[in-house]
C-alpha cells in the first residue's frame, strides 16, 4: 500500500501495533533509508487523539530545543547534551489521508535510530524474550525515565500511559522513550503531585519487573550470577539502598520526578562510575 502526503510517498509495510485509537505500521519514504512508523486512526472519531498527539509531540520538541539552546550557553563541555528530544517520538508530519477515508495519519520516527525495531518495549524483553536485567542496566533505564518524567511534568504534560509496553529502550545507545501520547493531557502549569507520583510509580514498576522482581511483594532478586560477575561484594549495603529506593518509587512514595532523579543518582553514584555500561541481561527463571 502507498500513502501520499505533501512530503512524499510512503510504502506501508507490516502492522506492528494496535491500540484503541490507532493502528501502527512500519513504512518507508521514497528516497530515504530511514524507517518510519505510520500511525493511523482506527476510526474518524479517533482522529482527535492523533491530532492531539501531533500537537503534543511538536510542543515537546520545541521545548526540548529551547532548553538545549539555553544549556549550550552555560555548559562546560561542548559535547554534553540534555537530549530530552530522545525521550519521545519525532513527529515527521501529520495529515488527513483521503485515500484512507479521511482518517488522521501521523508519521513518526525515532531520532538517531534508522530501524524502528531497535527501539524495544520493556514488556517485550520481559514477556517475549524472557530476559531480566542486572542492577546496573536497570539504573540507566530508571535514571533516564525519571529525567524524562521531570521534563514532561514540569512542562505540564502527563503521559497517561506509563507502563512496560509504552516505555521503549534502545539497548546499545541507552535511549529511553515514552511512545504513546494518545491519552496524554497538557495541564496549565506543572502536573499535580498525585498524577506525577502515579506516573513515577508506574515507570518504577516496569523497571522492577524488568529486574525479575515483584514490587507488591517488595522483592528484587540480586542473582548469584550477577553478584559474582558484575558487582563488588563490598558494595552490598549500597545495592540494598538502591533496591529499596526503586521499590519506594514503585510504591508511589515520591511525587517529584526532579527530586527523585537527584536522590536516585546520589545512590547510583556511590555504586558505579558514570561511564558506558553495556546492556546486560540474563534468562528469567
Image (tube, rainbow, N blue to C red):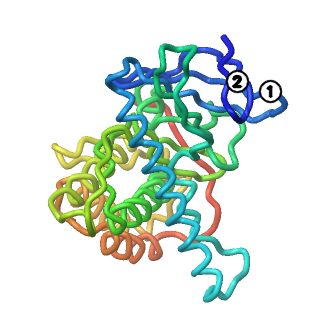
Give the image location of residue 130, x and y in percent. Answer: 45, 27
Give the image location of residue 105, x and y in percent. Answer: 52, 28
N-term-proximal mark, 2 vs 1: 2
Q: Which residue is mark 1?
A: 30
Callout 1: few (<14), some (14-19), or many (20+) C-alpha neighbours within 10 Å?
few
Give the image location of residue 129, x and y in percent. Answer: 50, 26
Toward the viewer: 224 or 204?
204
- Which residue is painted at 62% across and 58% down in the image? 277
Determine the secondary structure under disc 1. Answer: loop
Relative to residue 261, is residue 18 depicted above or below?
above
Callout 2: few (<14), some (14-19), or many (20+) C-alpha neighbours within 10 Å?
many
- Which residue is painted at 74% across and 30% down in the image? 8
Toward the viewer: 119 or 37?
37
Q: Which residue is mark 2?
A: 10
User: Hey, which quadrant is residue 145 in on the image?
Assistant: bottom left
- Which residue is painted at 39% across and 44% down in the image? 211
Q: Is residue 16 left or right of residue 161?
A: right
Q: Quadrant of the C terminus?
A: top left
Cα–Cα gap, marks 2 and 1: 6 Å
Amino acid at each position: 500500500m502507498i500513502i501520499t502526503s505533501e512530503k512524499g510517498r510512503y510504502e506501508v509495510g507490516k502492522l506492528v501495533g494496535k491500540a484503541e485509537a490507532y493502528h501502527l505500521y512500519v513504512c518507508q519514504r521514497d528516497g530515504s533509508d530511514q524507517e518510519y512508523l505510520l500511525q493511523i486512526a482506527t476510526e474518524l472519531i479517533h482522529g482527535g487523539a492523533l491530532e492531539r498527539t501531533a500537537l503534543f509531540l511538536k510542543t515537546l520538541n520545541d521545548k526540548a530545543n529551547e532548553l538545549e539552546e539555553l544549556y549550550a550557553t552555560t555548559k562546560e563541555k561542548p559535547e554534553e547534551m540534555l537530549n530530552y528530544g530522545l525521550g519521545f517520538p519525532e513527529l515527521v508530519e501529520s495529515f488527513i489521508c483521503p485515500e484512507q477515508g479521511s482518517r488522521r495519519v501521523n508519521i513518526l520516527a525515532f531520532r538517531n535510530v534508522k530501524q524502528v525495531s531497535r527501539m524495544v518495549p520493556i514488556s517485550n524483553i520481559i514477556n517475549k524474550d524472557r530476559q531480566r536485567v542486572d542492577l546496573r542496566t536497570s539504573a540507566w533505564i530508571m535514571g533516564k525515565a525519571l529525567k524524562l518524567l521531570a521534563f514532561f511534568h514540569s512542562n505540564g504534560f502527563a503521559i497517561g500511559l506509563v507502563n512496560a509496553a509504552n516505555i521503549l529502550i534502545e539497548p546499545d545507545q541507552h535511549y529511553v522513550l515514552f511512545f504513546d501520547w494518545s491519552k496524554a493531557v497538557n495541564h496549565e502549569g506543572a502536573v499535580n503531585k498525585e498524577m506525577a507520583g502515579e506516573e513515577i510509580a508506574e515507570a518504577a514498576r516496569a523497571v522492577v519487573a524488568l529486574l525479575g522482581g515483584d514490587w507488591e511483594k517488595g522483592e528484587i532478586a540480586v542473582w548469584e550470577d550477577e553478584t559474582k560477575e558484575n558487582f563488588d561484594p563490598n558494595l552490598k549495603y549500597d545495592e540494598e539502598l538502591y533496591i529499596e529506593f526503586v521499590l519506594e518509587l514503585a510504591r508511589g512514595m515520591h511525587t517529584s520526578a526532579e527530586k527523585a532523579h537527584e536522590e536516585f543518582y546520589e545512590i547510583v553514584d556511590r555504586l558505579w562510575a558514570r561511564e558506558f555500561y553495556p546492556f546486560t541481561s540474563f534468562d528469567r527463571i
